[in-house]
Amino acid sequence: MKPVFVCIFVLLSVFSLQAQDSKSSRSTMYFTYGKTGSNIREFNQMLDDKGLSPMRKGYSNFNLGYQARYNDFVVGFDLFQNPGPKSRFNGYDIDFRTTRFNLNVGFSFTEEGRFQLIHYMAIGAGFLNFQMLKDRESGSLDEFLQQPEQGFILRDGNIHKSSLNFANFLTEIGFHMSYDMPIPGRDEALALIAKFGYSFSPFEDSWQLNGVNFNNIQSGAFLRLGAGLTLPDYKFFYKDASLGAHLFYGLHFTSPDAFNTHLKENGLEPFSGRPNNWGVKILGYNKNLVYGVDVFNLGYGGRANATKTHSLNSVRIYANGGMKFLDLRNLEIGALAGLGFGNLRYSLTSNNKPDFPRLFEEPDHDGYLRSHGAMAKPEVFITYGIPLSSKKIFDLVLGAHAGYEVPLSPYQLAGLAMFKYMANPYVQFSVGVRP
């Protein structure tokens, strides 16, 4: 993730220079869904050599993005979850997924108005998960831990351990089009969005797993459609309408005590300390109304025994709404309520898997458990904005957030309810930019 932080520094520097002469601005939060074409050539060639049908081409793109425009200069970020198609071979499901975080720089071909056409380039980092697993019969957690082998899991980078464990550079070049639709009774506009272009890995052989090149999983032409909320300059004439993006680190005061008991009883090392937690937060303000989205990732990871590694991971996605109670110059205090989705995933993987094609012929090395459900949370926050230009075009925003997560599902892993682990108080510290 070091390259990503370098990119953030460079973008903020350019951001400041552009803001000095800025005359118009726009900020947008958006979601898109689309498809990217790809073909896993080396893996499909191996299947063809064995007389098996190839995996289906392409993968889906689920995208949360943020974009800020100053005159013709555009910066932003995109967070992607890209699940691939599932194929069935001899009782095993083969599929893959990738996660990406991109920072974008672009140039608008249009003046400020309802229609936008932007050409952009992006650089970021990614994570790759390729697996071949068979369905397990329902049983106890102890049965799973004693005999976890149900296939194999291959990962390049491992964000199941920590959000900062991305691997390798990724780039994207494309066009972003949007059109504003009025929202009855609201000052914000609904932006209808289309994006198209090409994603690729700039370095050859940078995504190799156990002797097979998976570069194509991270590449391909794409088309994405979606919608978002936008705050265009032509609709706002007061200072407290804004939409900002924030990076945060959180302390979650929880521990998987019941799960650790089963690990120790089965000769595996327990998880210790607090789960790693980095995430992104988008916060919008319109007078006293506050709204936005949180995405973050709680992860444990480490040695299970002399031959295995394990991780316990949970991704949370919240839609938030609330009120700002105090706005005193640059200081703001408010409260939010969030409703969202969470998952819980435990992986127990062997450190000594063979390379392909032997791995395909002898796949039983790793085990995997998962659960998912709904989550809710109340939260209070305090933020302080520091102007970064003489004209106060945008602020650097420092924030502190405190709340309590409440699971609305039992979150069972092999019959063990993880409700107490998912329910926890937290504190988050954020830094971001806001027009």
Image (tube, grey):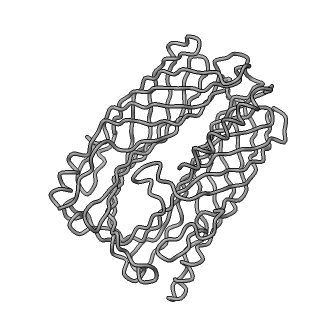
Would you say 19 lies left or right of 102 here?
right
Give the residue furthest to the left.
265
Figure quadrant of residue 255: top left
Q: Nearer the viewer, residue 93 or 396?
A: 396
180 on left or right of 355: right
Whole-percent x and y of residue 371? 35, 53
Quadrant in which the C terminus is drawn: top right
In this picture, is 173 found above or below 47?
above
Residue 316, horizontal then vertical, whole percent: 43, 43
- Up the image or down, 42 lies above or below 12; here it is below
Q: Position of residue 61 (x, y in %)?
A: 59, 55
Question: Which residue is drawn at the image coordinates 67% and 64% (left, top)?
Answer: 220
Name the spot of residue 400 as percent of width and height, x first: 45, 26
* Residue 160 drawn above or below residue 151: above
Residue depicted at x 61% and y 49%: 102
Seen at 49% across and 71% down, the residue is: 209
The residue at the point 43 percent across, 23 percent down is: 380
Q: Is residue 239 above or below residue 159?
A: above
Residue 222 lies in quadrant: bottom right
Give left or right: position of 199 versus 85: right
